[in-house]
Amino acid sequence: MGSMMQVLSILGASGHAREVEAIARSLDVDGRHWAEIRLLDASQEALLDGDGDAVLGMGSPSVRQSVMRRLRDRASWPILIHPQSHIGPRVALAEGVVVAVASSVTVDVELDAGSMLNSAVAVGHDVKIGKYCMVNPHATISGNVVIEDGVLIGAGAVILEGRRVGAGAVVGAGAVVTKDVHPNARVVGVPAREIRQEKD
């Protein structure tokens, strides 16, 4: 949680940023943690002065990575956990992690810096989620899964036990991952299969 009466800057100005703002406000209903909670778009980043708190408010893992790396030394990065989510024992959360309403993280889980679990995400035991990942609403990650850095998991997707999802991969909404996903791959369907990306 942020230090007393600092400003909390939500980096981004999209609908997703407003969702993160709502999580922050659920943690500060009495106004005692932050003097102000504000949304900052890219043109306002100069307002970060190294003395306040910041959290990522964008959905794209690559943008999350770029922004946090660029601004890492200009703010503190609190962990935001909605009060109506569940975090079990021996869960390690790194700086800048956000957990939205109704999410459940069981036991012996690691979430690395700048990652977000959106609403109603279920994470099983012994899961490792890398940096800058975005797990969208109602996704389920079974036990012993490894999600590498910069992964986007679509709404309602299911990652079955013991699978590995490689860095930069995209798992489509509603996909059921039954085997490992290669780095930078895009997978869709039930069971999930890799699709070719067309060149621009």
Image: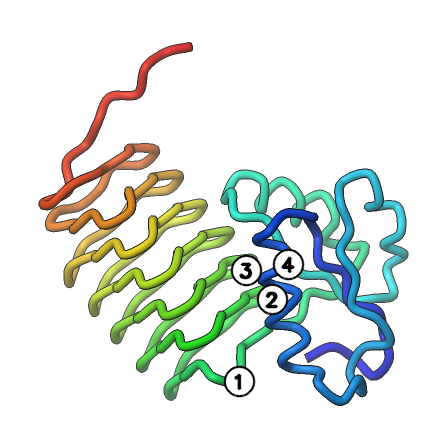
Answer with mark 4 or mark 1, whichever residue precedes in sequence. Answer: 4
Viewer-nearest of discs 4 and 3: 4
Cβ–Cβ under 8 Å for marks 3 and 2: yes
Cβ–Cβ under 8 Å for marks 1 and 3: no
Q: Quadrant of the C terminus?
A: top left
Amino acid found under the numbered disc labelled 1: Pro
Amino acid found under the numbered disc labelled 3: Ala
How much space separates mark 1 and mark 2, taking CA atoms? 18 Å
How much space separates mark 4 and mark 3, taking CA atoms? 20 Å
Instruction: For mark 4, give the secondary structure.
Output: helix
Cβ–Cβ under 8 Å for marks 4 and 3: no
Residue 155 in picture, x, y percent from top left:
33, 53
Is residue 166 toward the left or the right of residue 74 in the image?
left
Does 42 appear above or below 100?
above
The part of the image, by quadrant, that contains residue 119 is bottom left
According to the picture, the residue beneath numbered tag 1 turns out to be: 83
Viewer-nearest of discs 1 and 3: 1
Instruction: For mark 2, give the secondary structure.
Output: loop
Answer with mark 3 or mark 2, whichever residue precedes in sequence. Answer: 2
On residue 113, the disc is: 3
Amino acid found under the numbered disc labelled 4: Arg
Instruction: For mark 3, give the secondary structure.
Output: loop
Residue 23 in picture, x, y percent from top left:
60, 72
On residue 18, the disc is: 4
Q: How many marks?
A: 4
Answer with mark 1 or mark 3, whichever residue precedes in sequence. Answer: 1
Viewer-nearest of discs 2 and 4: 4
The part of the image, by quadrant, that contains residue 180 is top left
How much space separates mark 3 and mark 2, taking CA atoms? 5 Å
